[in-house]
Image (cartoon, grey):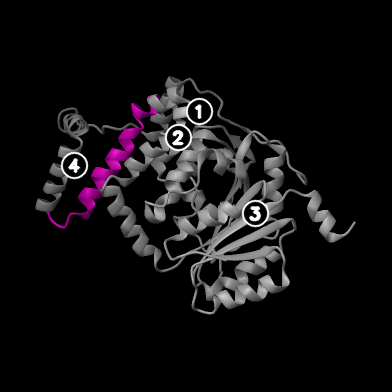
Amino acid sequence: MTSMSMRETLPLVSICMPHLNSRPFTEERIETILKQTLENWELIIVDSNSDDGSLELLKNYAAVEPRIRISYGPRDGIYSNLNRALEQARGDFVYIAMSDDTMKPECLERMTSALQHNPDCGICHCRLEIIDENGAGRSNENEWECLVAQKFFGDWARIPHVRKAPHDGLLHFYSGTVYTSLTQLLVRRRVFETLGDFRTDCGFHADFEWGMRVSLNENIVYLPEKLASWRQHPSQATQANAHQRLTAAGEFSRLAKVAIKSLSNRDPKLGHALGRSDLNRFQLVNELSARQKLARSEFQKFCATAVFSIIHPFFAARWAFTKLVLRRSITRKFKETFESELTRLGYRNLLRRAAPCEGE
């Protein structure tokens, strides 16, 4: 059997890559795609008029590799161009490849196999390796293993498992996001067709709303293998500051409400219940805390608290009474609240072992 006919018998994976001026990493990124053990893929690159020499390098690759297609889009954001790439996707599975990250040779094969063996799941989620500008591995608080969500899973994080909806979606109320990077996900194309693409009106945190939206509706299969990487840059310190300002502005509370609206057709009862859920308190506490942390003086802190109280009067009154009179926190430990909400909503056994994949 020829190489081309062998590819045609395997599922097609559409690799979508928004691209702008990533010359120091372009060659490594493309080489890790070319080395994939699953060969039936298409690489859809949407370039935003790169002018650092990376576009010429991409054209050289496309000239000799028919699986690579390049199109062009304006400089209106990563997610806008990612959506343009998704429009061109022909595969049953979609992998999002940021232009400065990398992946292990077996990444697509292992994640595709996991979804094939667990057909009730819309997304495969793997562990993530953090790398620096030079491609060297590094450990820090941003690793998925260090996130609150992972710690909540406990021993489940060490074995392949399935997390049934809305498990991961509910975790977004507390942990910000359950997924460090989109590069650790393989998604069935029908998920985008059913639940929509990425929002383009919320900057670099569009993946928070999308991740919450899809995981409220879709089951997730997890592989405890570091199959993908996320490269850290010095500019991410600026992003961390922007994240705190957006939290203080209530942006994540707003996006959580937007994500919940995705349940209006599939499970309106759950959507209504989540609107009244105690889990919402964690987002509001985070908003108040961020407002106070950004204040540079006690007077500014007082003003920040006053503004928050005007915006959220009922929550603020309850928070003040609980803190000043009852002398306790308005929120319980998240695990307690999470499990209480699962019981209230009628969910049981949302985690189970995944069906074994080939090679296990």
- CB atoms of marks 1 and 3 within 8 Å: no
Of the pair 341 and 60, the residue shown nearer to us = 60
State the residue in front, 69 or 184.
69
Whichever of callouts 1 and 3 sits on the residue coming sooner in the sequence is 3
Q: Secondary structure at mark 3?
A: strand
> Which label was assigned to residue 195?
none
Return the disc, 4 or 1, that comes first in the chain's sequence: 1
- Closer to the chain start, of discs 2 and 3, is 3
Q: Which residues are magenta?
A: 273-297
* Image side of residue 142 versus residue 183, left or right: left
Q: Residue at x 62, y 52 (%)?
A: 89
* Residue at image location 15% in from the left, 50% down from the top: 301
Q: Amino acid at mark 3?
A: Ser
Q: Is residue 101 visible?
A: no
Question: Vertical placement of 154 versus 201: above or below?
Answer: above
Instruction: Inspect the image, locate mark 4, and give the three-letter code of the amino acid beneath it.
Output: Phe
Q: Position of residue 255 (x, y in %)?
A: 37, 42
Q: Which residue is mark 2?
A: 262
User: On residue 308, which mark appears?
Assistant: 4
Q: Are marks 1 and 2 in contact (CB under 8 Å)?
A: yes
Question: How far apart, in angstroms, are the residues tagged by discs 1 and 2?
Answer: 8 Å
